[in-house]
Image: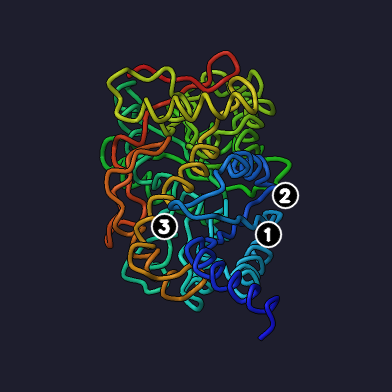
């Protein structure tokens, strides 16, 4: 062997252990940055752009794709991320329908997903083998529905009209709110609408005719403003509640004066600075709010940005624990170890709550992850309780 080749071999021999010690963790991200759910996806993407370049102390690479709020495209993205990019985990999608549709991809490829959509059907029933690979950041609808009903009872609301999306988001909220309402609040009308509808006059008139004390709009993003504006235009004067899905700046812009006073459940991160000092999430939530708004401007933080950054915090914790098993990123063994680590996350504080994930609960939040919010002076504020 020549002296030059010997030197090259020595360099390679030294470099190989260094490369193996710096295994790259690859995360696929599927977001709705265009289409009807863009108001949500853009906020998620803002937070993704702030993700540190490491996970668990190792270099990380993020492959971000837009699904245009299209379920089929989301599934295609997930197949590309798993087959071509060989990702170790997926973050997203933003919509429940897309997350549920992608469950088959997770099971077929053994890839964990941290969804950024809200409905519990993404992770329940946990006995379903496909859902063993699915986790999610947003609070389950049941958790948010319970704080809504508590607020209604405090305010003397006895009857409620319900108008929700005619999809899995609306279905999940209908079931959750029914269960939470029990005998405490009577639902006197139920209507549905589509995210792309230009008018909901018919549905609004039917709800008004039932004379409810309050109305719950179970929608997300900008489309959720349409029923509220229509109800007010047609003379409704009762209290209007929304779900945590409205936490976008575009909802405030589209709704304008018509959404002033809207009551909604929210993660504590959205109203971080107004939380009582004793709130266990406040310190982490304020730190993220300061960091986010330093980049994107005052009063720009939303639930969806907090969830997306929380996804990085969750993965950072889980990747570090998965690496300790000796499994290498890019392998089925590592994806399995990462899934197991996600499932054993304990007392992790993220901007919107405290995560305790288990085999029976792939969401992991408790009552510390929800407060009541109100639209006040054109922004999301903490509603004193």
Q: In the rendered image of this protein, does residue 115 appear above or below residue 216? A: below
Q: Are marks 1 and 2 in contact (CB under 8 Å)?
A: yes
Q: In the rendered image of this protein, does residue 204 appear above or below residue 329? A: above
Q: Residue at x 37, y 74 (%)?
A: 129
- Per the rendering, the mark at residue 375 is none
Q: Residue furthest top?
A: 377
Q: Secondary structure at mark 1?
A: loop
Left/right placement of residue 185 relative to residue 22 reads left
Location of residue 257 in the rendering, given as x and y in whole percent from the top left corner: 64, 18
Residue 9 visible, this angle: yes
Location of residue 39 in the rendering, given as x and y in whole percent from the top left corner: 66, 40
Q: Secondary structure at mark 3?
A: helix
Image quarter (top left, top right, bottom left or bottom right) of the C terminus: top left
Q: Residue at x 36, y 52 (%)?
A: 363
Which mark is first along the chain, 1 or 3?
Answer: 1
Q: Secondary structure at mark 2?
A: loop
Front-most of residues 184 and 202: 184
Left/right placement of residue 318 relative to residue 191 reads left
Which residue position is annotated with label 3? 319
Quarter holding residue 131: bottom left
Location of residue 208 in the rendering, given as x and y in whole percent from the top left corner: 54, 31
Q: How is the image coloured?
A: rainbow
Crowding at label 3, few (<14), some or many (≥20) Cα neighbours within 10 Å?
A: many
Which residue position is annotated with label 1? 70
Image quarter (top left, top right, bottom left or bottom right) of the N terminus: bottom right
Which residue position is annotated with label 2? 35
Q: Are marks 3 and 2 in contact (CB under 8 Å)?
A: no
């Amino acid at each position: 062997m020549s002296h030059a080749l010997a030197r090259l071999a020595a360099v390679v021999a030294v470099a190989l252990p260094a490369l193996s010690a710096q295994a790259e963790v690859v995360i696929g991200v599927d977001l709705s940055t265009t289409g009807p759910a863009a108001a949500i996806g853009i906020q998620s993407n803002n937070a993704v752009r702030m993700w540190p370049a490491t996970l668990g102390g190792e270099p990380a690479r993020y492959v971000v794709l837009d699904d245009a709020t299209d379920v089929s495209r989301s599934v295609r993205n997930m197949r590309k991320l798993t087959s071509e990019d060989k990702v170790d985990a997926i973050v997203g999608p933003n919509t429940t329908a897309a997350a549920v549709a992608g469950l088959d991809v997770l099971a077929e490829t053994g890839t964990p997903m941290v969804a950024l959509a809200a409905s519990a059907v993404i992770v329940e029933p946990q006995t379903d083998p496909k859902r063993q690979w699915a986790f999610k950041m947003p609070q389950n609808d049941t958790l948010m529905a319970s704080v809504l009903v508590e607020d209604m009872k405090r305010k003397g609301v006895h009857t409620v009209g319900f108008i929700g999306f005619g999809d899995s988001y609306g279905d999940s909220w209908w079931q959750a709110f029914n269960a939470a309402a029990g005998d405490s609040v009577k639902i006197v009308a139920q209507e549905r609408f589509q995210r792309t509808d230009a008018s909901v006059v018919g549905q609004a008139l039917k709800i008004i005719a039932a004379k409810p004390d309050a109305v719950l709009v179970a929608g997300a993003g900008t489309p959720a403003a349409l029923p509220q504006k229509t109800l007010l235009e047609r003379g409704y004067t009762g209290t209007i509640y929304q779900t945590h899905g409205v936490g976008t700046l575009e909802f405030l812009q589209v709704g304008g004066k018509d959404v002033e006073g809207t009551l909604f459940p929210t993660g504590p991160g959205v109203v971080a600075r107004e939380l009582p000092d004793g709130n266990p999430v406040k310190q982490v939530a304020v730190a993220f709010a300061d960091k986010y708004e330093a980049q994107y401007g005052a009063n720009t933080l939303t639930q969806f940005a907090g969830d997306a950054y929380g996804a990085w915090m969750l993965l950072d914790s889980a990747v570090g624990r998965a690496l300790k098993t000796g499994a290498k990123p890019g392998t089925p063994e590592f994806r399995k170890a990462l899934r197991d680590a996600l499932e054993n996350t304990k007392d992790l504080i993220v901007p919107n709550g405290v995560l305790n994930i288990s085999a029976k609960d792939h969401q992991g939040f408790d009552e510390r992850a929800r407060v009541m919010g109100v639209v006040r002076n054109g922004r999301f504020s903490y509603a004193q309780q």
